[in-house]
Amino acid sequence: MRKSLMLCSSLALLASANVYSHGLMSEPAARNWTCGAVTKPDQAQPGTACAEAFADDFNGGYQFMSVLTHDVGRAGVEPLPDNVCGFDSETWSGGATPWDKPIDWPTNPMSAGEQTITWNISWGPHYDDTEEFRYWITKPGFQYTVGEALSWDDFESEAFCVLEYDDSNPNANPLVVPDKGNSLFHTTCTVPERDGRHVIYGEWGRNYFTYERFHGCIDVEFNGGGGPVPVVADIQMSPEVSTVTGAGQVSLSAANSQGDDLSYQWSVSPQSAAYSLSDSTGVDTVLTLSDTDSEQTVTVSLEASNADSSSITSVTIDHLPEAASNWDSLGALTDTAQTLNAGDTVQLRLVTEGGTDVYLPDNAVVLSQESAAASAWTLALAEAVNELNTDVRIGVVDSDGDVAPVASATENRVYAQAPTQYVSAFVVVDSGSSSSSSSSSTPTGSYCNWYGTETPLCEDTQSGWGYENGASCVSVTTCNSQPEPFGVVEGNASSSSSSSSSSSVSSSSSSSVPASANCAHTVSNSWGNGFIGEVTITNDSDTDINGWNVQWEYDQNVAITNSWSADITGNNPYQASAAGYNQTIAAGQSITFGFQANGSPGEVQVTGDICD
């Protein structure tokens, strides 16, 4: 069997392919929505619940959309995992997430009866293989106690709401409403009678193709109780557009932001004479865009704050030159470079407003050893699509409005002739071999190293994911479709992304002379037009590094919106220096700093006096 991956064209090309979509409950706000989506770790004010949640796992707070497993969830897993809200998430290697902490979480007002719970799946919307939503609530008489972790005994054994969904007939269940234009699912449930403070645990489950499942907890207060209203920044656009061609204006309002006595701070990136805001501190502002020579990603950010806390949000607009007025941009073909394998096939999948799939070209492009390179297969796919189509093209738009492909891993974009019926585009990659190894034999073993997570191998399931012996499993074929070093192993799969150091470090002297270090840029998560980037500096020498500065630059426009564990300055190129506590890197040790950004990272080289 052949393994298929669908890669959203507006997403980075799977830097970590153990997940193909991301989502969480946004209304009422789940823990990871309040502390994660709304308040990032670097924005959490000292003494707040979010600061306490992220205290021991700062970087993990940026993975708020990735609380996931590959299994059938609360209703079928035995034994149940130790952690309730994160369900022993694979992203945390089965450990506790920041949202499993027994702290005084902000609560949402709740009433018994019919209520709507909304899932935001903007970080990789998957409607076609969504199967169900399930919700459980704590038992009558439950007492929430700060310092005591939630247990499954706190919850009813049966879900109070189970909703099935079939995207081939999306209106069949009126209690599940797919809002595809906004990447939302609205689910309606009858909430049982309760008094006081309770917790609702929810799951969004996908079907047998992946058995991917997302988990989360909503803290609620019945009978009008609840804590202070949290600050939530919100931007409303008029007109509500994702693309502006040529010169234009867009009105933006923060009037729907949540919180008391709010003040506002607006900013726009890139900082250029082509882009300006009419008011940087008012509740409303107007973005004015001058014509551009080439496509730009424009980001408008809003910080809403009061005396207690603050919240930051942003919107992005694809700005096209006037010459491209006959095209609608569907996003980047790929946002990160990835080399494929000889024998793989690639195809463009387009999704219409009605949810119909269209594949281009009709026959997928088969890659050779030469055309499997990161900058070659994108060009081959673009040329194949453009040869037979005039209404959809892949490439770079020029000053005459023509779209032509280039030999680049990240510069090509997908365009549809305006007005278009298409709402999104994906790259579909079919692995043509059962193993990424150069050996002709199929590796044998007892476990699958699934992108760093030890996962049981299926005995009966021949392709994709299965559920056997009370646990999720992955087929040998699917396991071996991963790139090296992942695949079938004899137990104890180790993560390729984790950095480690020796438990005993040989005696070393401290030196102000630059030591030899490995400096690497990685993308740990991505969605839409954004990503989480990390830079790891590993001291390969036998002397300590005292103080460090590194630099890097992106091929395309990338705007860093916030960062942590380093002082980051500049505007592509960027520079980073030590945050104080991590200025010394002992011999054999490593440090990692991170940031959230908008744009397409591509291939990045980190340089500096200490870097190899």
Image: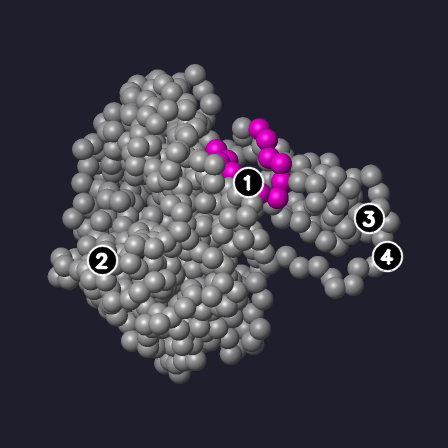
The spot of residue 268 in percent (x, y) is 42, 26
Q: Residues within 10 Å of mark 3 (few under 14, many from 20)?
A: many
Question: Which mark sits nearer the N-terminus, 4 or 1?
Answer: 4
Q: Which residue is the site of mark 3?
A: 543
- Residue topped by disc 1: 563
Does residue 454 lie above or below 286 as drawn? below
**Callout 2 amino acid:** Gln
Question: Please, what secondary structure does the residue beneath circle 2 have?
Answer: strand
Q: Are marks 3 and 1 in contact (CB under 8 Å)?
A: no
Query: Mark 4: which secondary structure?
Result: loop
For label 4, the crowd category at 10 Å Cα-Cα, with few meaning under 14, some 14 to 19 and many 20 or more, is few
Vertically, is 213 above or below 302?
A: below
- Judge whether residue 440 can be spotted in this image: no
Between the residue at mark 3 and the residue at mark 4, the CA separation in whole angstroms equals: 9 Å
Circle 3 — which element?
Answer: strand
Residue type indicated by callout 1: Ser
> Which residue is at a point 43% across and 40% down the rendered structure image?
311
Q: Which residue is mark 2?
A: 115
Tell me where residue 327 sits by quadrant: top left
- Disc with the residue nearer the chain's start (3 vs 4): 4
- Circle nearer the N terminus (1, 2): 2
What's the residue at 48%, 45% (across, down)?
A: 40
* Image quadrant containing the C terminus: top right
Of circles 1 and 2, the one toward us is: 2
Q: Earlier in the sequence, mark 3 or mark 1?
A: 3
Separation (CA) of disc 1 from disc 2: 37 Å
For numbered disc 1, what is the local secondary structure? strand
Of the numbered discs 4 and 2, the one sitting upstream in the chain is 2
Q: CA distance from mark 4 to mark 2?
A: 62 Å
Which secondary structure class fits the magenta region best? strand
**Which residues make up the magenta segment?**
558-570
